[in-house]
Image (tube, helix red, strand yellow):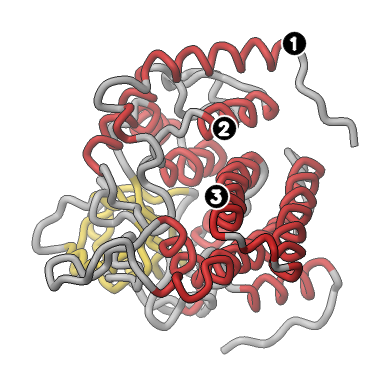
């Protein structure tokens, strides 16, 4: 495959680099590196302000196909989106808090939403003013999403939503949630579901309970809906499964390449630790580090190979299997490089701060979930078996 950046891409790179250099100053310079895996709440208020700064510069929504800058966003080709991600990572800009709205909801509204919905929600996302969370998984319907029990009952022009969602990332900070709920109780499984847009500021009707992870942070949450009002349905009533699956298919392409830039930085940190502590003298560890480097290169070329491709039912599942296992192995390798010292935190334990961890320890604990969230490995293998290899479907009750 021939993948090269053209003169227009390099001009875009210079523009991105200049903008980041001129804006990552003052209070924003102090946020460098904040908000990574296992430290999602670090600098939360400052990162929300940074989101608005990005919006003012037009840097949110580069990949919104068909938007053509209509919502205050710049337009960028696929290669230019990769360029922006590379420069963003190299500048050590803070972790994004608006990625769910920008990369999941907005492309979904552009395909399945109506014009009124696009005009209401996309400008606010592009300005960095409204944050979103995703209401999919439930206690008894995680990997088997079609078994969800949250219901939405017609109430005038809208719906009343009741039920529980779980593992809802950034629910405590979000202004809105897109919720998959059952609007037709007579239907089973994936039929009779609708994709609803729910405002999170509904006291007494929505309760968010943080779930403390073993890293000490609470990036995701339980969310309880008790008659919450939903005034918007995307794609029409009963079309929720089609819309939801269309959204999940967008967690690929450029976003995968962006993710890999972060992976490369983490791998470099692990290699640096191996140099500092002398672990590179161990031939087994040295071989494992080289293998991680080689596998990351393979993932990059696979992502470039499928960049912008449509109609490949197995590509998102293959990508998820590749990066989930790779990242988890990197976390394990970081601890093996440290040896016994990996069990010691950077500060003494206290009741007020029992979770003092350094970056590599947070990496290890966070990556335990990589083969589960975003669709477990087992589910990804089922998708490949059924949709790519044509093996018999497993009947689910």
Residue 77: which quarter of the image?
top right
Do callouts 2 and 1 mark residues in contact (Cβ within 8 Å)? no
Q: Separation of disc 2 and disc 1 at Cα?
A: 17 Å
Identify the residue position indicated by label 2 in the image.
85
Vertical relation: 131 (above or below) 368: above
Please name whichever residue, 347 or 210, is drawn nearer the observer in this view of the structure: 347
Q: What numbered label is drawn on residue 269?
A: 3
Mark 2 or mark 3, earlier in chain: 2
Residue at 44%, 71% (x, y): give it: 341
Q: Separation of disc 2 and disc 3 at Cα?
A: 19 Å
Residue at 74%, 81% (x, y): give it: 393
Q: Which residue lies furthest to the left in this view?
A: 204
Identify the residue position indicated by label 1 in the image.
7
How many circles with numbers are drawn on the protein?
A: 3
SS at badge 3? helix
Please name whichever residue, 72 or 317, is drawn nearer the observer in this view of the structure: 317
Q: What numbered label is drawn on residue 24?
A: none
SS at badge 2? helix
Quadrant where the image shows the C terminus: bottom right
Q: Where is residue 96 in the image (x, y as percent from the top left)?
A: 40, 40
Q: Separation of disc 1 and disc 3 at Cα?
A: 32 Å
Q: Position of residue 92 (x, y in %)?
A: 46, 34
Do callouts 1 and 3 mark residues in contact (Cβ within 8 Å)? no
Q: Where is residue 352 in the image (x, y as percent from the top left)?
A: 12, 67
């Amino acid at each position: 495959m021939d993948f090269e950046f053209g003169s227009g891409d390099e001009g875009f790179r210079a523009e991105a680099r200049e903008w980041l250099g001129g804006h990552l100053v003052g209070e924003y310079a102090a946020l460098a590196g904040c908000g990574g895996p296992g430290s999602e709440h670090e600098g939360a208020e400052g990162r929300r302000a940074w989101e608005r700064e990005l919006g003012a510069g037009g840097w949110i929504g580069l990949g919104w196909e068909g938007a053509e800058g209509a919502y205050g966003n710049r337009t960028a080709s696929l290669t230019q989106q990769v360029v922006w991600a590379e420069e963003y990572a190299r500048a050590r800009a803070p972790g994004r808090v608006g990625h769910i709205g920008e990369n999941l909801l907005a492309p979904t509204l552009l395909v399945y939403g109506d014009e009124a919905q696009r005009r209401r929600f996309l400008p606010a996302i592009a300005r960095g003013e409204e944050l979103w969370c995703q209401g999919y998984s439930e206690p008894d319907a995680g990997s088997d999403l079609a078994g969800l029990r949250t219901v939405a009952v017609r109430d005038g022009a809208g719906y009343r939503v009741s039920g529980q969602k779980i593992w809802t990332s950034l629910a405590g900070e979000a202004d809105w949630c897109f919720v998959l709920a059952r609007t037709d109780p007579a239907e089973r499984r994936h039929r009779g579901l609708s994709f609803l847009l729910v405002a999170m500021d509904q006291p007494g009707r929505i309760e968010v309970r943080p779930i403390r992870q073993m890293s000490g942070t609470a990036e995701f949450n339980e969310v309880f809906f008790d008659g919450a009002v939903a005034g918007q349905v995307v794609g029409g009533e009963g079309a929720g499964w089609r819309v939801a699956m269309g959204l999940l298919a967008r967690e690929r392409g450029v976003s995968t390449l962006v993710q890999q830039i972060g992976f490369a930085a983490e791998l470099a940190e692990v290699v640096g630790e191996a140099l500092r502590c002398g672990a590179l003298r161990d031939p087994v560890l040295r071989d494992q580090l080289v293998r991680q480097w080689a596998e990351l290169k393979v993932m990059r070329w696979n992502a470039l190979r499928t960049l912008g491709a449509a109609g490949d039912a197995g590509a998102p599942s293959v990508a998820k299997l590749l990066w989930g296992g790779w990242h988890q192995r990197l976390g394990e390798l970081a601890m093996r490089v440290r040896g016994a010292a990996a069990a010691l935190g950077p500060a003494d334990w206290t009741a007020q701060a029992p979770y003092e961890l350094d970056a590599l320890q947070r990496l290890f604990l966070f990556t335990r979930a990589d083969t589960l969230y975003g669709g477990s490995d087992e589910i990804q293998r089922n998708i490949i078996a059924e949709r790519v290899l044509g093996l018999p479907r497993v009947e689910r009750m």
